[in-house]
Image (cartoon, rainbow, N blue to C red):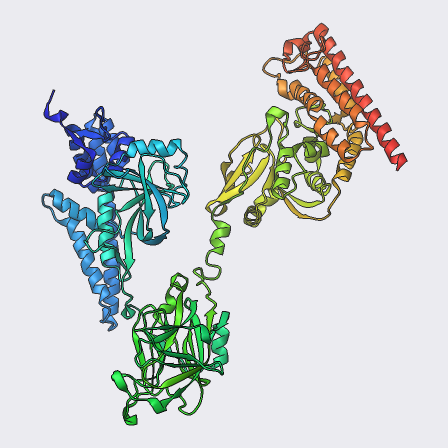
Amino acid sequence: MDKKNNELIKITDLTTQLGLSSRSLRYYEQIGLIQSVRPEFEKYRFYNMGTIERLKQIMVLRKMQIPVKDILRIYESESMSVVVETFVNRIHAIDDEIGALAELKRIVGDFLQTMLDNGITKISAIPLLYEEMDKQLAVFEEQKPVTIAELDDVSDKLAKPLDISIVDLPPMRVLTSFRKPGTKESDFSGFSRYIQINGLSVAASGSHQQFEFQTEAGDVLMVRVSEDFINDSEYLDYPFAGGLFATVNIYLDEDLGQCFRALVRQLNANPYYQFAYCTDGTSRHPTLLEDLISPDDKRELVTMLVPVKKRMADPALFDPPIEITDITIAEIEAVNPVLWEIDVPLDKMTPINSPHYKVLDNGEVEYTGWIGTRVLNTNVAVKFPFRVDVEWRTDFSRAEFGYGSSEGSLDIHHGSDINFAFCVNAGNNPDDRLSMEALTFYQPIFKNRYHFNKRGQINHDGYNRVTWILGQTHLVAIVNDEIRYCGVNFPYMSFDLNREECLPIIVGGDGQSMRYFRSIKVSQLMYTPKNKIKKEELVMITKQSNNIISTIHRLVTSEYGENYWINGSMKYVMECLGETDYDYQFFAGLTGDMFTQHYSHTNFAGEAISSYLSDENPARFFEDTFLKCGYAATYVASEEVLKNTEMYLQTLIAYIDKGIPVIKCGNPEGVFVGYEDYGKILLYITGDKNEPERVEIDKVFESKPFHGYEYKSGWIFVGDKKEDLPLAEVYRRAVKNIIPLQSVKTDTYCFGAEAFRAWARDIENGKFDNMTTEEFDPWGYHTNYVCVLATNGSCCHGFLQRAQELNPDMSFLEEVSRLYRRIAEMWGGDNNRNDTDSLEILGGGFNVTLGVLQDKQKRGKIVAKIREFANVTDEIVRVLTDGINKTEGEK
């Protein structure tokens, strides 16, 4: 065996050697591209030379943009044809890219020529774009040997610009795979087991709760823990400072190193954010990786996070502010409303740097600062946007213009950095001719200075009033009820002001002039978050893209005898409307499906009486059924839907968007619970399926006959609640409706006792005597009727019990329930085998055969048993009739 091939390299050394992340190595191992070994007593994974050579090959193939799934095919196949096919497919893809680029080059060239022909020659970006595209095409067109370095260069050039986001991770306490102080080891695998065992790894993907990164100690896993977490493990916990991070999403089968380099390039060119370095030149924190939920189940998605910080705000990147003059103070105040305001207690202000500060008997404050750094803190803190109102007078008799000061100014500062003031009466001089009496201020956040001579003039002989409004839409200075400056479109106004710090308002001023403050009011202005969505911009998408009702589950539970999907469909709709009392048993009782035997004189005509009744007039049947619950409903036949598909599709979408499913009648019965691709695909759930299936809109009404029976199809839209009916009364009416259902009889079918007798007569009279095995359909001719009597005998008791609970005077329902249990016993299936001559034992149940029905002796016993069912049904009708008459008479 090759000794060199058995040499092992530790994962941490390999990541450095190849420039691959350990996460990528684990991913390649997970999908079967490579294998690692873990020698005994070693915490790290190792790779042999054969694996390293394969990794080098994989890196080359990925730089050629060969998909990982194709690389896997290459290594799984021993056929050279797979390799050739993969490269041919890539060449074809490149040809397509070249064709697209060439076409784009032509379009851009034509556009450029049109601009030049029209004399537009100052748009420098257009020629630069043209030149850059020429360079990109030249890469493909040069016919010369390609080196790895050139391949790297081309791969980087073709990489698309990253979609970078900035997130602000909160400070948090974290537990890591570092062992506790004293070692520099990271036990990634052991820590992974620890957090799983102790339930610490349950954070949702993308929730900023669990990260991994690389250090000299190897791979490190980091999970957020609560502040009161008791760490009795061998692993290190510490406070994670959080802060700003630039993030980009990337699939693990892509080149993480290339992504990182591209991120570096884009951040270097970003005018707003830059990498956050420490004073020693290292990054504030190693690059983090966090798992995300991938939209592609076959590819693992992560987000890469690198620490960043804001660059110094540069106003040159923005349009200049605009001064407006045709506005009133009232109009300004109307668009800069006050959230709260505080009248500053003048005797509670805090002197900073020892100014003269004295509270006078009249409540005013006497102040002088001599120099601008000696100020008074109001101890009222606000965020942008805010407003400050000051009323004061200045005694200029003491003005000396000492210390190089500008006498008589009034400065307002937001925070302790007093280099940036909002100032009136600034830039004065002993020679009045040289005094500026200026209005000056520094733009918030950007700190660039604005200066307006003579706009800061104040009264020298009395009190003055100044108002500074640092608003979301206006920056305003008002002196003695006169607007001295009003500007809009300042760059700071485009920022998220909610993110700015809450800082105290500080007042002061230059010079020896004594100032007397009568009042200071600080106001927090209302901040309206910027509407990031234009009106109606996303409404259409929300209504017409994809949606699904939040609660998806089975319509029926067949193992509990819930056999009729239409009842489950109606129950599901009412559940979504918040009507939890209207469950499956309720609708099976309301329709009579769980109380009434049916029989067709001809062929199979449905599995329950609701099939028969709805077939004659579906609109009347379904609309009446919901009306009995107090709800309006509209049945639309499939023929009508097909005539106006778009209208009814939009109606269905509107229902789904409101959380209301739409019932579909026909085979199979079910409900529409969602839609995709603007309604081209409908999500449809039937029966006891847990998940909906996708049906194309043009195939919605494709219906297959069921045992030769063609169900009528249509949609049912359940509308508003028209009447709030007492539940007890609804149940009472349903019980009373059982009686007339038992006597329904037409030329083609019959219900109740007559259904049993007609069924018995047909068997007795030899309906099956001349039938062949191929012609005999057990379900259509016999066992569906067995299913009905078995369901009625076993499943109606919950409805009857609930009806009696709501209507205590209906005590006769106990006897009705006993008679239905007798039907179940006579059937004899499952747990009801007390009768030695039950229908199942006689061979006339679900176990029926054509031979039994053709045997006169055997079928005679079956016929007799079926007639017993008819007699019990007669008794049920009698008990119901007597009981209802009695309760109605007593009322």
Say above or below: 96 vs 477.
Answer: above
- Residue 581 lies in quadrant: top right
- Residue 23 picture location, percent across and down: 27, 38
Along the line of sight, the residue nearer the viewer: 710 or 520: 520
Query: Is there any visible trace of residue 67 in the rendered image?
Result: no
Query: Is there any visible trace of residue 71 in the rendered image?
Result: yes
Say above or below: 95 vs 876.
Answer: below
- Relative placement, left or right, of 878 versus 5 is right
What residue is shown at x 12% (from left), y 49% (from top)? 142
- Relative placement, left or right, of 867 versus 394 is right
Q: Quadrant of the N terminus?
A: top left
- Residue 364 picture location, percent across and down: 46, 81
Number of marks in the image?
Answer: 0
Most extreme residue toward the right, as rendered?
889
Along the line of sight, the residue nearer the viewer: 361 or 341: 361
- Relative placement, left or right, of 501 versus 699 is left
- Residue 877 picture location, percent across and down: 81, 25
- Residue 194 lies in quadrant: top left
What residue is shown at x 11% (from left), y 43% (from top)? 147
Most extreme residue toward the top, as rendered?
857
- Residue 854 lies in quadrant: top right
Say above or below: 856 vs 461.
Answer: above
Along the line of sight, the residue nearer the viewer: 41 or 800: 41
Q: Quadrant of the C terminus?
A: top right
- Residue 490 picture location, percent across and down: 36, 72
